[in-house]
Amino acid sequence: MQSEKPVPVPDVVTQQYWDGARREELTLLRCRDCDTFVHPPKPTCTNCQSEAMEAAVVSGQGEIYSFSIMYNHGNPGFEDEVPYAVGIVHLAEQPGLKAIGNIVECNIDDIYIGMPVEVVFEHRSPEVTVPQFGPRK
Amino acid sequence: MRGAPIRENVAIAGIGYTGCYRSPDAPISTMAMRAIVEAVADAGIEVADIDGICTYDLPIRTSDGVTGVNTVNCEYLIEALGLPGVTWWADRGMNVPMGLGGVSEAAMAVAAGMCEVALVVSTSWRPKSGVYAAVNEPLATGPSAFTTPYGFGIMPQMWAPWWRRYMFEYGATEEQLATFVVGNRANYLLSNVPGVAPKDPLTVDDYLNSRWIASPLRLLDCDWPCDNAGAVIVTTAERARDMKQIPALVLAVGGGTGPRHSFEWWDNGANHGGDYVAKGIWEKAGIGPEDMDFFMLYDGFSPFAFYWLESLGFVGRGEAGDFIAGGGLSREGSLPATPHGGSLNEGRSLSMGHVIEGVRQLRGTAGLRQLPRHATTVVTGGGDHMCNVVVLRADV
């Protein structure tokens, strides 16, 4: 039987990301001073060290930068899903800006580097929605 | 001159090693003591001569560490060894990459005069149940909120996309990777290296037909969980020359992380921390990659062979595959690597096995595995993200 998947715990730095996900918005932090997106979220800008970080909804569009098909579940909650795909997605808004998610709504054999994807939202519980990525429609 | 305080002023004078085992008969503290006793005897000194100590220790999840049972630290060892006169000590985990990092720190401490005879102890412990290195926390806090809810939480899973990206960018092939894996197994079979991998020959076809862990990484691309303990005596070159063995002179130590310490978030395939290490390491060492007789490259995952060859400047970026396929890393090649079979065969020694074998080769005491050219080597630790490098020369 499959056990529970790890439940992401929002904190003061990441709350906006998880609140946005529940609204089905991919919400990153962006520096007001130099326009740099920082992900995973940090309270200060990695480019200019400013504290002027604010929530910004992004398009959710991107390309698969790389991926792996998992044949070992690793952490709990994925025992019955093997084989499944994890992708590193290069988001459209900024060079080098990456998001991690499962690649869903497609055959794992059809996944390739450069594949256009867009965010989809998986509502795992009333409290938890996780962004995922599927083929761009 | 930069790097001068260490170069040729510090040496490895003693080694002790339990080898890698699946289910040893003793707690890790006893294994550590065996390695320490062996290193002290190897150097021809007394325990009381030790005045500095550094531990690199890896229970798989630090929160599960029980001192004396599956983990050791300086406090424990100072008491266990009865050492009243320690003037330098450092407990290290993953912040300093691997046991090799402990050797580097000891070299710095000795060069700075913090101590004169430093003991470096590296231990690795395999949990006896559950999926190895599995992240079992049901709540994903902090940065893990962005990885483990996706089933992206164990090391081979996290390294796999980078190898796929490297192959994509440079045209490297799984056959080239297989060449390294197969050659490493051949090295392991040369002599009785205690280790976890089966003592069976491996062919490229065996490799290509073997099972996936996280594509494009196979089970055979991953090192083997094991228990082990290693100990190294680091001292001044002057003291080392009065001890029993041929000193392994330290020419340089270096570390590097690249702009992203957490490798699952690299900006691109060229994050390699090894590039940053290499910027200074050869200048500090006073010799270059072309002077290396053999290569103790850290092979926690097989693709590291590609990254390290390129980062340290043995070949240009993207050229490692051809070099490996051409036999460059084999015993007969221009840069024999991991003559003991590496972590991929002996087990997850977290670079301590590479230090130990490197020193044996330098001394000429590697028996059936002895390489004919063995005066200089570079030992690496880590997968080219947070990583560590030590350049050594036999004092002959």
Image (cartoon, rainbow, N blue to C red):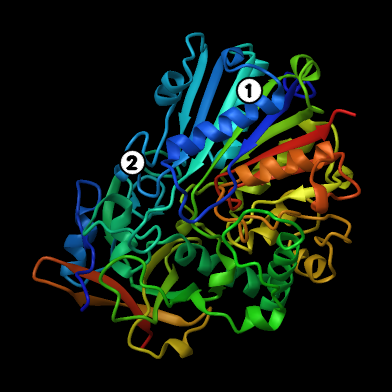
Please state which of the two labelled residues, at mark 1 or mark 2, is closer to the viewer: 2
What's the chain of the residue with tag 2?
B
Question: In the rendered picture of this protein, how many numbered marks are placed on residues?
Answer: 2
Tell me the kind of residue under disc 1. Answer: Met
Residue at the top extreme, as displayed:
B85
| Residue B232 coordinates in the image, percent (x, y) | 63, 31
Q: Is residue A93 left or right of residue A95?
A: left
Whether residue B70 is situated above or below residue B328 in the rendered picture: above
Disc 1 element: helix
**Residue pictured at 25% horizontal, 52% vertical:** B141
Residue occupying the far left of the picture: A126
Mark number, residue B108? 1
Q: CA distance from mark 1 to mark 2?
A: 28 Å
Q: How many other residues sit within 10 Å of disc 2, few (<14), some (14-19) or many (≥20)?
A: some
Residue A28 visible: no
Instruction: Identify the residue shown where x is 58% and y is 18%.
Output: B47
Question: Badge 2 is on which residue?
Answer: B65
Does residue A113 appear anywhere in the picture? yes
Residue in front for this viewpoint, B29 or A31 = B29
Q: Amino acid at mark 2?
A: Gly
The quarter of the displayed image where residue B39 is located: top right
